[in-house]
Image (tube, rainbow, N blue to C red):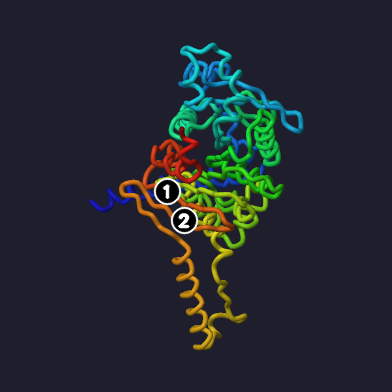
Amino acid sequence: MSESIQPDNDGLFTRIRKIFAVLGFLYLGAVILLTVPWIQSHILYMNALKLPWNAHFDAPERHGLAPGKTANIKIQTADNHTLGAWFILSDTIYHDMSFPPPPSAAELHISEAVTQRPTVLFFHGNAATRALSMRVRLYSGFTSRLNANVLAIDYRGFGDSPGTPTEDGLSLDARAAWDWLIAQGASPQDVLIVGHSLGTAVASRLSVGLSEDGVKFRGTVLMSPFSSLYTLVDTYNIFGVFPVMLPINMIPRAAGIYKSFLIHKFDTLSVISKLKVPILILHAEDDWDISHTHSDALFDALLEPYLPPVYSPPVSQELWTTQQWGEYHTQLVTRREARESLLTRTVIPNFGSMDQFDGFGERITLLKTSTGSHNEVGTLEGVQDVIRVTFFTPEDLR
C-alpha cells in the first residue's frame, strides 16, 4: 500500500517544486524589468490606463456632474504643456443660476466663483483620469459639504493632457494649476491644496514651494499618502498580503542596490517639515495599497522638532554601563511624556481617531479612519466633515 502511494507523493512534490521555480523566475524577471526606467515609469504612473475609456471630458455631465456646473478648461504650463482640467462650481454659486443653465455657464462664472467661494485644488493619484467615478464623487462632496469650488487637473500624459509624466513635470503641472487659479482672481488664502495617493507627493511639493515663497494659503490635505517612494517599495504588499521586497530583503545589501535603480523619489518625508500652513493627513486603517504607517511617519516628522532629543552613548549597547542605560531610559520617558502633553486625541466612535497639535502656530492633524480603503476614504462624509471643521469657517459654508 505504501509503495503505491510513494510515487504519487514524489510526483506531487515535484509539481510543487516546479510551481515555486516558475514563480521564482517570474519574480526575478519582474524585478529585473523594474530596473528599466521606461517600465518603472509606466508602473508608477499607470497613465496609459485612461479610465474611464472614451471619457467625455467636454461633457462632464456624462460622468455624473450637474448640467452646466463644470467648465472643461485648458491650462498652459511653464514648459509649454497643455493640461486638461475641470473647474467645478460650488453649490452656492451653481444654485444661484437658473436651471437648466446654458452649457457655458460654469466657464462664465469662474471669476465670480473663485472670488466668492474657497477652492479645492485637487491632485489625483496614479492611473485613470479626472473623470473616474470615484474622483467625481470626491468633487461632488467638496462642492456640497464644503461649499467649495474644485479645480481638478490631469497631469501631462494623463487623460487628454499630452506628454510624458515625470516627477519634475508633475511639479510644473501643479504650479501651473495654482497660477491659473490666482490669474482668475482667487486669493491664496482661499485655496486648499488636496492630494490623494501619488497626488500627495505632488501636493506636498507645491505646498513646500509656496511656503518657501512666503505664500499663505488655506492649507494642505494629504489623503492616503506615502512617505517616500523608497519606503513605499519596502512596505508594499500585493493584495495587502504578499510583501513585494521580502525575497530581496533576504539577500544582504540587495534591497539597497535594487532601490538605487529607482529614478523617481517623491520624497515627501524629507520636505514636509518645511510646510508652514495647517495640515491634515488622513488614512484608512484598511488601506491595502499604502499602509497607514506612512501617515504616522509623516505626522511624526512634523512633531519631531517639538520633542526632546534622545542621545545614545557613542559605543555599542553591549558596552553601556548601568548609569548610561538609566540615563537613556529617562530620556525615553521624558520624550514620551512630552509627546503626550503636545497631542490632543479625539476618538470618534464607529469612525476613527484624530491626533492634533499646534506647530509653528498652525494646527497639524492626523486622522485615521477604520474604513475607507485606499480609494474611497476621501468620499466618506465623516472625512469631508473633518476637512470642513479643520479648514473652513461658518462664513465659508454659507
Front-lying residue, 38 or 169 = 169
Residue 263 in sight in this render: no
Residue 91 has which mark? none
Q: In this view, does 266 lie to the left or right of 296?
A: right
* Marks 2, 1: nearer the viewer: 2
Front-lying residue, 227 or 25 = 227
Which quadrant of the view contains residue 70?
Answer: top right
For mark 1, give the secondary structure.
loop
Residue 356 has which mark? 2
Residue 241 has which mark? 1
Q: How crowded is mark 2: few (under 14 residues within 10 Å), some or many (20 or more)?
A: some
Q: How far is disc 2 from disc 1 in space, using C-alphas?
A: 31 Å
Residue 304 vs 17, above or below: the answer is below
Residue 96 vs 239, above or below: the answer is above
Which residue: 63% across, 33% down?
186
Give the amino acid type for the residue marked by disc 1 in the picture. Answer: Val
Q: Residues within 10 Å of mark 1 (few under 14, many from 20)?
A: few
